[in-house]
C-alpha cells in the first residue's frame, strides 16, 4: 500500500508508539485497525493498555514485565502477519444507525456548510446520510467518535476558532471526517445536526458500544422524533 | 439511627477533588485516566494510614479546614504542607489520630503545590469504570465535581484503635523535601525523546533553555513559558495520536505544555519529549513561576527509573520511628 510508512518508537520508558501512516486515508485506517485487533488478541497478556489514534496506536507496558525492545520486535512481526489477514479475521465489525435532527438550532453550521459546498441544505443532508462510515477511532473526549470518509463535496474544513461549548450528541464535519460529541465539550467541527441518543453513559460498561472498525450511518429524523428518542442509549437503539 | 459521618469540610480556598491512582483501561474510548497528579505522594498518604496505595483520597491545591464526625486516622502528604490539629502543629507525611470533633487544617508552605489527605478506610463514593477519581469535565467519578464547603466525606469502616497501634510511628523511608522543587533553583525533569522529536530540528532549544510554569496550568496540563520551538508550526496539521501524562506537547505558538492526568486521550499537537513518571510527580508539585529544565535520558534509563518507581507506588517504603523497615 503506497501510503503506509510504519514508524515504531519508544517513549517515556513505558509506551510504544506506532504510526501507520503520516496522513489519513481509509486504507491507512484499515491497516491500523488490522494491527490494533491483532495486537489486542496477541499481546493482551503482556501489555497494560492499547489505545488508537486515527492512523496510529500506543501500547502502554510495564517495564518490570517486558522491555520496549522486545515489544517492538513483536509489533513488527505481528504487523507483517496482520497485513496479510483480512480485518474480519481479527474483528467482526458491528453496524450502528444514529438518528440525527439536522439544521436549525441543533445544527447551526448546516447553512454555512451548504453555502461552502454550493448545495442546498437538503443535498448536504442527503450526502451525509447516504454514506456508511467506518469508526476510525474514539478519543479527544469520552465517547467522541471519529468517522470517515466524508464525501469530498461536503468535506468542509473545521472552524478557525473553536466553540467553547458544544452540546453532547452534536454531529460535526471536519474535512474528510465526521464525528459525534459524546459529552459536552469545546470543539471546532462544523455542527450540522444533533442526535437525541446518549452516546456516552459512564454508568454502563462499556460506556459506549461503538469500537474502531465498526460501521456507522446517520438517519435524518424530525424534531418530534428527536424529542421522543431523548436519552435513549446508543446501544439500545434499533432502527 | 446515627449516620457515621467522618470529614466535614468547613473551609476551602483553592481546588480539591477526590482522586485515586486513575481510571485505566478506558482510554481507547476517550476516557482520560484522571487520578492523582503526584502519584507517589498519594500512594504514601494511603500507606501511612494502612490503606492500599490506590485508595480514594483528597487532592488539594490550596488550603482546607475540616472537622471530624468520629475518630479517624489521616495522613497529609504532597509537597511540604503545613498541618495543624486544633491549632497545634502536626507533621505532614505521618499518620495522625483525630478524635471526634477535632479540626484539621492544611495549608501550603512555600514548597510544593499539591497536597494529599488520606483517611483510613478510604473515601466512600461512587466508583465509575473501576475508579473513584473525579473527572470534573466529564462530571463523573466520586462526587462528579470538586469538593465544596459543607460537603461531608464518609470513610470506610476501620477499627481505629487497633489500626493506630500498627501505624502510629510509621514514616516514609524517602525524604519528602528531596522531591519537592526549590524556588531558588530550576527543577530538572528527565525526559525521553518522543513521537515527533526527530521532526523538530530545534529540539535543542527545549533541552537547553529554562522554562517557567505559568498560571494557566491545571489538571489537564502545565503550561510553560520560555523560548518557543519555531519548527512545530511547520509540521502542519497532524492526525490525532494517543497521548499520555508526561507528554510534552508543542502547540502552534511553540510554548510547551506538559500533559497531566486529566489530559484528553488523543491530540493533534507535536509531542517533543516525554517526562518520565517519577519526575512528572515532582513537576506536579511545581507552582506557577517555578523554573524548569528538561534533561534527556535514554529509553533504557527511563525503563529502569520507571520500574523502580512503579514498585514504590505499588508498595511505598515505610519504616518505624526506630528506623526499622515496615
Image (cartoon, rainbow, N blue to C red):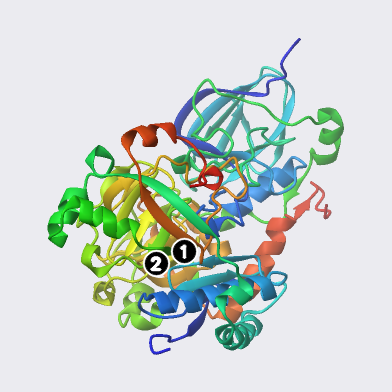
Question: Can residue A11 be spotted in the picture?
Answer: no
Q: Disc 2 sits on a residue from what chain?
A: B
Looking at the image, residue A42 sits to the left or right of residue A162; the answer is: right
Assess whether mark 2 and mark 1 are in contact (beta carbons under 8 angstroms). Answer: yes
Q: Estimate how packed mark 1 is, as few (under 14), some (14 to 19) or many (20 or more) residues with alpha carbons within 10 Å.
A: many
Residue pointed to by mark 1: A137
Looking at the image, residue A12 sits to the left or right of residue A171; the answer is: right
Up/down of A106 relative to A61, above or below: above
The residues bearing labels 1 and 2 have C-alpha atoms spaced at a distance of: 10 Å
The residue lying furthest to the top in this view is B1
Up/down of B182 relative to B110, above or below: below
Q: Disc 1 sits on a residue from what chain?
A: A
Which circle, 1 or 2, is nearer the viewer?
1
Position of the N terminus of chain B by quadrant? top right
Residue in front for this viewpoint, A39 or B54: A39
Q: Residue at x 43, y 49 (%)?
A: A98
Q: Residue B282: image x %, image y %?
A: 52, 57
Residue pointed to by mark 2: B240
Q: Residue B97: image x %, image y %?
A: 73, 30
Up/down of A78 relative to A99, above or below: below
Q: Residue at x 57, y 39 (%)?
A: B141
SS label for mark 1: strand
Amino acid at each position: 500500500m503506497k501510503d503506509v510508512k510504519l514508524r515504531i518508537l519508544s517513549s517515556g520508558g513505558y509506551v510504544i508508539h506506532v504510526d501507520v501512516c503520516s496522513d489519513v486515508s481509509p486504507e491507512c485506517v484499515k491497516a491500523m485497525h488490522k494491527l490494533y485487533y491483532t495486537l489486542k488478541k496477541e499481546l493482551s497478556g503482556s501489555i497494560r493498555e492499547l489505545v488508537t489514534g486515527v492512523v496510529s496506536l500506543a501500547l502502554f507496558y510495564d517495564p518490570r514485565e517486558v522491555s520496549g525492545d522486545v515489544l517492538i520486535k513483536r509489533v513488527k512481526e505481528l504487523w507483517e502477519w496482520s497485513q496479510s489477514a483480512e480485518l474480519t479475521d481479527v474483528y467482526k465489525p458491528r453496524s450502528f444507525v444514529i438518528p440525527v435532527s439536522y439544521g436549525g438550532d441543533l445544527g447551526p453550521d448546516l447553512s454555512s456548510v451548504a453555502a461552502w459546498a454550493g448545495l442546498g441544505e437538503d443535498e448536504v443532508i442527503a450526502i451525509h446520510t447516504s454514506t456508511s462510515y467506518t469508526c476510525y477511532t474514539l478519543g479527544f473526549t469520552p465517547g467522541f467518535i471519529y468517522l470517515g470518509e466524508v464525501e469530498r463535496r461536503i468535506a468542509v474544513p473545521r472552524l478557525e476558532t473553536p466553540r467553547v461549548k458544544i452540546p453532547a450528541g452534536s454531529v460535526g464535519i471536519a474535512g474528510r471526517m465526521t464525528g459525534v460529541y459524546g459529552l459536552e465539550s469545546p470543539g471546532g467541527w462544523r455542527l450540522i445536526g444533533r442526535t437525541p441518543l446518549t452516546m456516552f453513559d459512564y454508568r454502563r460498561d462499556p460506556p459506549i458500544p461503538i469500537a474502531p472498525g465498526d460501521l456507522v450511518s446517520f438517519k435524518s429524523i424530525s424534531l418530534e422524533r428527536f424529542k421522543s428518542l431523548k436519552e435513549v442509549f446508543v446501544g439500545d437503539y434499533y432502527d | 439511627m446515627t449516620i457515621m459521618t467522618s470529614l466535614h469540610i468547613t473551609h476551602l480556598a483553592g481546588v480539591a477533588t477526590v482522586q485515586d491512582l486513575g481510571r485505566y483501561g478506558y482510554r481507547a474510548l476517550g476516557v482520560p485516566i484522571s487520578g492523582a497528579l503526584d502519584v507517589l505522594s498519594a500512594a504514601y498518604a494511603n500507606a501511612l494510614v494502612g490503606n492500599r496505595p490506590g485508595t480514594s483520597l483528597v487532592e488539594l491545591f490550596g488550603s482546607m479546614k475540616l472537622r471530624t464526625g468520629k475518630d479517624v486516622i489521616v495522613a497529609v502528604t504532597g509537597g511540604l504542607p503545613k498541618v495543624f490539629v486544633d491549632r497545634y502543629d502536626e507533621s505532614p507525611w505521618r499518620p495522625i489520630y483525630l478524635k471526634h470533633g477535632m479540626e484539621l487544617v492544611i495549608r501550603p508552605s512555600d514548597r510544593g503545590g499539591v497536597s494529599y489527605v488520606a483517611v483510613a478506610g478510604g473515601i466512600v463514593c461512587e466508583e465509575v469504570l473501576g475508579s473513584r477519581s473525579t473527572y470534573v469535565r466529564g462530571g463523573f467519578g466520586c462526587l462528579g465535581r470538586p469538593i465544596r464547603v459543607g460537603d461531608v466525606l464518609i470513610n470506610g469502616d476501620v477499627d481505629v484503635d487497633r489500626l493506630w497501634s500498627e501505624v502510629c510511628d510509621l514514616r516514609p523511608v524517602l525524604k519528602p523535601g528531596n522531591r519537592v522543587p526549590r524556588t531558588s533553583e530550576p527543577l530538572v525533569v528527565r525526559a525521553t525523546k518522543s513521537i515527533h522529536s526527530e521532526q523538530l530540528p530545534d529540539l535543542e532549544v527545549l533541552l537547553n533553555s529554562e522554562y517557567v510554569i505559568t498560571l494557566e496550568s491545571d489538571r489537564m496540563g502545565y503550561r510553560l513559558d520560555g523560548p518557543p520551538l519555531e519548527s512545530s508550526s511547520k509540521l502542519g496539521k497532524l492526525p490525532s495520536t494517543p497521548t499520555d501524562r508526561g507528554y510534552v506537547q508543542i502547540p502552534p505558538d511553540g510554548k510547551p505544555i506538559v500533559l497531566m492526568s486529566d489530559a484528553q486521550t488523543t491530540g493533534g499537537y507535536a509531542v517533543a519529549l516525554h517526562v518520565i513518571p517519577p519526575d512528572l510527580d515532582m513537576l506536579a508539585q511545581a507552582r506557577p513561576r517555578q523554573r524548569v529544565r528538561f534533561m534527556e535520558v535514554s529509553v533504557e534509563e527511563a525503563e529502569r527509573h520507571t520500574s523502580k518507581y512503579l514498585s514504590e507506588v505499588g508498595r511505598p517504603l515505610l519504616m518505624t520511628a526506630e528506623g526499622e523497615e515496615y
